[in-house]
Image: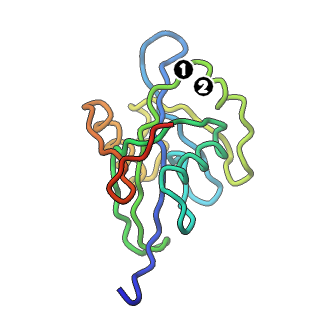
Amino acid sequence: MSKPPARRSGQQVFALREDPGGSGELSVLLVDPVYRDGLTLPGGSAEQDELPHLAARRHLETETGLVLPLRTILSVDYVPAAEFPEGLDFVYAGGVLTHQQADTARHHQPPEEIRALHWVPRHQLRDVMAGDQYRRVEDAWDAWEHGDGLPLLVRGVPVPVG
């Protein structure tokens, strides 16, 4: 291609924790960004020539303090050009966090573009997220529950876990 189209590549992380009260209910980690209404999964855009899973990991660490091995993609969401450039948003499986990892996120001071971190149970997601973000998280949750997902490949080679 002599002039390939510009396209944004968004990377987000789906991470869960069990209710610390012992109910067994799972909640997903969401961030409250200052630049949009509603909560979203932690993440952001990849820079040019940045491996996608490393971009997801960088944003996750900056926003939540967590460093997780990210290799499995739970969903891919095509976003047509509108308020953002056309793009593909990848949602990575972050897994169920340990109590220590959840504490790391709880004590982390997010950057100024993130108001706060929230743990939200599935039945409350629709109330705190914009429709497109809610549908993306629901799809990722369904894929995670059913053991679905795709390994990330770079030039046909699976990326290492870790």
Q: Nearer the viewer, residue 69 or 14?
A: 69
Rendering quarter of residue 113: bottom right
Residue found 53% across the figure and 66% down from its top: 49
Q: Position of residue 4 (x, y in %)?
A: 40, 83
Is 155 located above or below residue 27 in the figure?
A: below
Q: Nearer the viewer, residue 3 or 61?
A: 3
- Residue 104 visible in the current orientation: yes
Instruction: Specify whether 105 is left or right of 46.
Output: right
Position of the N terminus by quadrant: bottom left
User: Label 2, on which residue?
Assistant: 101
Rendering quarter of residue 24: top left
Q: Position of residue 6 (x, y in %)?
A: 45, 78
Around disc 2, counting alpha carbons within 10 Å, would you say few (fewer than 14), some (14 to 19), or many (20 or more)?
A: some
- Give the structural element (helix, strand or loop) at label 2: helix
Around disc 1, counting alpha carbons within 10 Å, would you say few (fewer than 14), some (14 to 19), or many (20 or more)?
A: few
Residues under numbered marks 2 and 1 in contact, where contact means CB atoms less than 8 Å apart: yes
Residue found 37% across the figure and 71% down from its top: 80
Q: Which mark is residue 98?
A: 1
- Give the structural element (helix, strand or loop) at label 1: loop
Marks 2 and 1, how far apart at CA: 5 Å
Amino acid type at image mark 1: Thr
Q: Position of residue 100 (x, y in %)?
A: 62, 20
Give the colour scheme of this rendering: rainbow
Residue found 56% across the figure and 46% down from its top: 57
Is 68 located above or below residue 52 in the figure?
A: above
Amino acid type at image mark 2: Gln
Is 65 located above or below residue 52 in the figure?
A: above
